[in-house]
Image: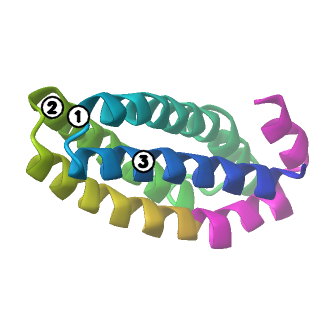
Amino acid sequence: MSAIPQLIAQHRGCDDWFARAEAAARAGDWDATAAAWTPFEADMEQHFTLEESQLFPAFESATGMTMGPTAVMRGEHAEMRELFIDLRAALAARDADAFVGHGETLLILMQQHNMKEENVLYPMCAQHVADFDALVARA
């Protein structure tokens, strides 16, 4: 699988785990919420790590752009990580209103973020990063 479809598949996998967690929280099933939240957060962190430690530096090295799209994506990753803290607290407190409220904010941010990566950044990486497919495949 080439890099862009692989990265998009990672996004969709995270989206699926998050939808399960949110549905379980709405239903008040906290065991199911935790069972979906744990792999969601782990997969998100794995994806962020791939981007922040390998993909973004490779793109910046190839283009010389350090304050462009990768800076925006890093900032959005930080915003999502802050929301993860809020969501973990809501999960621990079994507070459905807080979980769903923070979840709606996270969902909007994730959707916007993924669209920018999938439609702008990843194609730019494919154009400028010589070993883009191999870099993503190794991760």
For the residues carrying marks 3 and 2, which lies nearer the camera in this image? 3
Label number found at residue 95: none
For the residues carrying marks 1 and 2, which lies nearer the camera in this image? 2
| Label 3: element kind | helix
Residue 36 placed where, x, y %? 42, 35
Instruction: Give the mark nearest the N terminus, 3 or 2.
Output: 3
Q: Residue at x 65, y 47 (%)?
A: 10
Q: Is residue 122 above or below residue 40?
A: below
| First to last magenta residue range | 117-139
Residue 76 placed where, x, y %? 39, 53
What residue type is disc 1 on?
Ile
Q: To which residue does mark 3 refer?
A: 20
Label number found at residue 89: 2
Whole-Å distance between the Cαs marked 1 and 2? Answer: 6 Å
Q: To which residue does mark 1 refer?
A: 85
Q: Residue at x 10, y 52 (%)?
A: 97
Whole-Å distance between the Cαs marked 1 and 3? Answer: 18 Å
